[in-house]
Image (cartoon, helix red, strand yellow):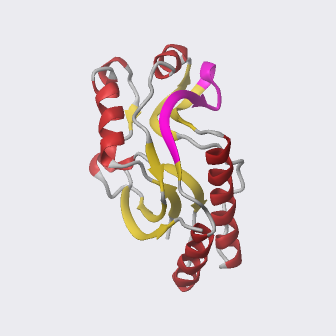
Amino acid sequence: MRMFAAVVPPEEVVADLDAFLNVRRDAGPFRWASAEQLHVTVAFYADVPERALDDLVERLGRAAAKRTAFETRIAGGGAFPHVAGARVIWAGLDLDEEGRTELDRLATGARAAASRAGVAVDGQRFRPHVTLARLRHPDDVSDWVRLLDTYEGPAWTIDRLRLIASHLGEGPRGRPRYELVDELLLGR
């Protein structure tokens, strides 16, 4: 199974960001993520064997329990791999030092939990972001990044980690369909 551990913003936060983007979407020939797909991936698991799932959930629960809830907001943005040749446009998170530390440790814990459960983990450096759109061909998105830099959404508390299964091509217009597998509360 293809899965990921993620922090998912509450509906009102997603609605605010969606309203900001909605009036601008037609100006960009991108594949925009739907509101239901907005999240911050803390660990990606390309192939979770069925036999490892229970162990993964248990270990993720322990990792989440070691963390403390913290506040953030969606603010600013950027592009991967870089603004002049972007393939992905993303929104950032506004985190104080404590929040950044907690999120980094949550990501480290989610990756360690998978490794101990025998699940391979994407080894890329963790960069907290919310993917907003994908481009078919690399392009300069400087204007979009400047626009995102003006955005600051409502504050919200990250207090849970979600394990989500991603079913490629099963969603609307051939996008992935996400299925919540488990929700694990933060709390030390």
Q: Is residue 34 visible?
A: no
Is 82 magenta? The answer is yes
Looking at the magenta stretch, what is its main secondary structure? strand
Tell me the magenta residue range.
Answer: 71-85
In the image, what residue occupies the spot 36% across and 33% down? 17
Rendered image quadrant of residue 63: bottom right
* Mark count: 0
Is 140 situated above or below 182? above
Which of 130 and 153 lies nearest the eye of the viewer?
A: 153
In the image, what residue occupies the spot 29% across and 27% down? 22
Give coordinates of residue 139: x percent, y percent: 54, 21
- Image quadrant containing the C terminus: bottom right
Give coordinates of residue 136: x percent, y percent: 48, 32
In the image, what residue occupies the spot 34% across and 17% down? 27
Is 13 situated above or below 178? above
Is 49 situated above or below 188? below
Give coordinates of residue 124: x percent, y percent: 70, 50
In the image, what residue occupies the spot 29% across and 46% down? 173
Q: Is residue 164 visible?
A: yes
Which of 84 and 163 lies nearest the eye of the viewer?
A: 163
Give coordinates of residue 103: x percent, y percent: 62, 52
Q: Is residue 180 left or right of residue 123?
A: left
Query: Residue extending furthest bottom?
Result: 51
Is 135 magenta? The answer is no
